[in-house]
Amino acid sequence: DLADKVKATREKYLVGTIVECINMGEETRPVPTGTRGVVTSVDDIGSIHVNWENGSSLALIEEIDRFKVIK
């Protein structure tokens, strides 16, 4: 269920995790490929909030966006 999914996402992407965008699937103005950012939180629906190095704060959605953990 959603609560279990959110819990697992929060455990996988801890605050401070550095991620790199590969592709933002459905965003009209996506974070560019190769941009890195720091996870700031995972909200109650499982969106991964990131402060990107380009100043953006767009969230990642695990099922839609492609990204990788740097550290």
Image (cartoon, rainbow, N blue to C red):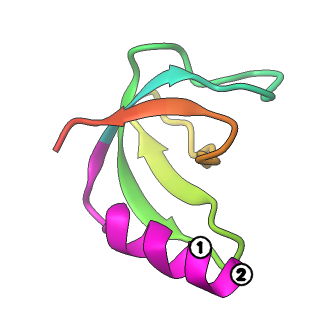
Q: Amino acid at mark 2?
A: Asp
Q: How many marks?
A: 2
Q: Residue at x 63, y 67 (%)?
A: 46
Give the residue pinned by disc 1.
Answer: 5
Residue at the left extreme of this rendering: 71
Give the residue pinned by disc 2.
Answer: 1
Tell me: residue 43, above or below residue 49.
below
Residue 10 placement (x, y as % from top left): 43, 73
Q: Tell me the distance, in whole angstroms, between the alpha carbons under discs 2 and 1.
A: 6 Å
Q: Residue at x 54, y 57 (%)?
A: 48
In the displayed structure image, the side of residue 59 where residue 29 appears, left or right: right
Residue 37 placement (x, y as % from top left): 36, 39
| Image quarter in which the C terminus is found | top left
Q: Amino acid at mark 1?
A: Lys
| Magenta stretch, overall SS | helix
Q: Which quadrant of the figure has residue 52?
A: top left
Is residue 13 or residue 28 the one in the foreground? 13
Q: Residue at x 66, y 44 (%)?
A: 63
Q: Which residues are magenta?
A: 1-18
Residue at the bottom extreme of this rendering: 3
In the displayed structure image, the side of residue 45 where residue 23 appears, left or right: left
Residue 3 placement (x, y as % from top left): 65, 86
